[in-house]
Image (tube, rainbow, N blue to C red):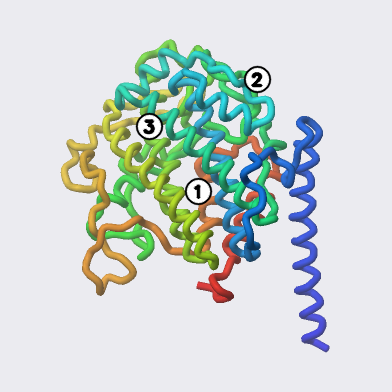
């Protein structure tokens, strides 16, 4: 009798959770359908996506849905940066307008002052921003097309594009966003993590933040209005913040793909994860190099919020942990300290990978202002991905 009651309770909880996820997904469908006549299973995907053979396991489908959601979130971030400081040739805009209902197909013209601040890190930053944006959009549409080809549910977050845009020159001011780039709390321990020859977060090591003030308070990485352009020093602080945020975004993908790849069962799904994940590594390699060029700034105060930020001369500190030209991962401990040091992606521990990504994105401040339904849907997608089993066995 006791076992039957326990089983009944467990089944009820599972059914309740399933119903809640279904409700949330249907809510996203309804919200999108109300404005653009499309939902999760009817998002526009090119015709070539039809008809490849085979079905995905529930676990593989869940993994792909979560990384697709992550790519949609990344695309939203990069589109905001691209509008203000990317190449203004219309290429990215045309692609985005085909994928995102109501997104303008014409370039904004950018923001000259903000672009100049960004280009203090590298004169080619506008091209890199546009290329990164295009890459994330391509990942997003491919993953949904692949899911569709296997008869699996796709991901559509259009109903949650409700956050306000920057009102500065160069932004699509009236277009709703998924993410908030004006209240960021950025942990830059990725910088020291990849330069350490002894420490690895997979082995419970904690690395310091080389820009500790970015991890305290809320910082804007884009001009909120044209008023943010009036002080050259503050504007450069915004540009520096963006430079480190670029690297922060991509180091997450660098680890997420190999983390989840360890749970994939189908070799083609494994190929998809490793192939897209490799591009995230390319992105991170580029952005951490450029972040090292951020001009030193001392105690720059945000005139709106009063929060301050300092960007030190990282090379003046001495030692490999902050050396700016160490952009290739230093060999470090891997799997166990009994093995010799190895140059690796870090971290790659698979347990809790998707929920860890949601926690990091949330802690970054990207979802400040988002709805509870959005957060519940994202957490459900992550929970499903973390529950995936490789060939029926948990890692």
CA–CA distance in space, label 3 to label 2: 25 Å
Question: Residue shown at 68%/38% (left/top)?
Answer: 44
Mark positioned earlier in the residue sequence (3 or 1): 3
Which label was assigned to residue 360? Answer: 1
* Mark in the foreground, 3 or 1: 3
Task: Give coordinates of residue 170: x percent, y percent.
Answer: 52, 16
- Asked if marks 3 and 1 touch (Cβ < 8 Å), the reply is no
- Residue 361 sits above or below residue 369 on the image: below
Question: Residue shown at 27%/51% (left/top)?
Answer: 329
Q: Residue furthest top?
A: 230
Q: Nearer the viewer, residue 151 or 227?
A: 151
Mark 3 is surrounded, within 10 Å at the Cα level, by few (under 14), some (14 to 19) or many (20 or more) other residues, namely: many
In the picture, the quarter occupied by the N terminus is: bottom right
Q: Nearer the viewer, residue 273 or 125?
A: 273
Query: Mark 3 sits on what residue?
Result: 243
Query: Mark 2 sits on what residue?
Result: 174
Task: Give coordinates of residue 375: x percent, y percent.
Answer: 66, 47
- Residue 303 sits above or below residue 293 on the image: above
The answer to whether one can see residue 82 in this image is yes
- Residue 16 sits above or below residue 32 on the image: below
Question: Residue shown at 36%/17% (left/top)?
Answer: 116
In the structure shown, which secondary structural element does the residue marked by tag 3 occupy? helix
- Asked if marks 3 and 2 touch (Cβ < 8 Å), the reply is no
Question: Residue shown at 60%/66% (left/top)?
Answer: 387
Mark positioned earlier in the residue sequence (1 or 2): 2
Mark positioned earlier in the residue sequence (3 or 2): 2
């Amino acid at each position: 009798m006791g076992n039957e009651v326990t089983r009944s309770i467990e089944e009820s909880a599972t059914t309740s959770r399933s119903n809640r996820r279904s409700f949330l997904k249907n809510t996203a469908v309804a919200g999108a359908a109300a404005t653009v006549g499309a939902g999760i299973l009817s998002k526009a995907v090119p015709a070539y996506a039809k008809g490849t053979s085979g079905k995905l396991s529930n676990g593989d489908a869940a993994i792909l849905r979560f990384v697709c959601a992550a790519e949609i979130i990344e695309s939203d971030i990069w589109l905001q940066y691209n509008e203000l400081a990317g190449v203004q040739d219309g290429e990215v805009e045309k692609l985005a307008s085909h994928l995102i209902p109501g997104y303008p197909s014409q370039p904004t013209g950018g923001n000259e002052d903000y672009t100049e601040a960004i280009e203090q890190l590298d004169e080619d930053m506008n091209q890199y921003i546009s290329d990164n944006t295009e890459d994330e959009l391509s990942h997003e549409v491919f993953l949904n097309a692949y899911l569709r080809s296997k008869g699996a549910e796709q991901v559509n977050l259009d109903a949650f594009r409700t956050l306000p845009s920057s009102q500065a020159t160069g932004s699509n001011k009236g277009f709703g966003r998924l993410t908030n780039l004006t209240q960021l709390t950025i942990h830059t321990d990725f910088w020291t993590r990849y330069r350490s020859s002894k420490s690895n977060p997979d082995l419970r090591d904690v690395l310091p933040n080389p820009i500790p003030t970015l991890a305290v308070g809320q910082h804007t990485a884009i001009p909120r209005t044209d008023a943010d352009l009036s002080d050259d020093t503050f504007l450069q602080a915004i540009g520096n913040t963006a430079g480190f945020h670029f690297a922060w975004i991509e180091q997450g993908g660098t680890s997420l793909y190999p983390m989840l790849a360890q749970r994939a069962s189908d070799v083609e799904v494994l190929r998809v994860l490793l192939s897209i994940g490799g591009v995230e590594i390319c992105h991170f390699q580029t952005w951490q190099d450029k972040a090292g060029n951020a001009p030193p700034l001392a105690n720059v105060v945000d005139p709106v919020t009063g929060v301050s930020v300092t960007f030190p001369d990282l090379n003046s500190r001495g030692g490999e942990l902050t050396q700016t030209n160490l952009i290739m991962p230093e060999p470090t401990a891997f799997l166990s300290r009994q093995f010799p040091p190895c140059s690796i992606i870090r971290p790659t521990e698979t347990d809790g990978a998707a929920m860890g990504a949601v926690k990091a994105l949330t802690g970054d401040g990207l979802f400040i202002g988002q709805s509870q339904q959005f957060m519940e849907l994202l957490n459900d997608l992550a929970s499903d991905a973390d529950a995936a089993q490789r060939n029926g066995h948990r890692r």
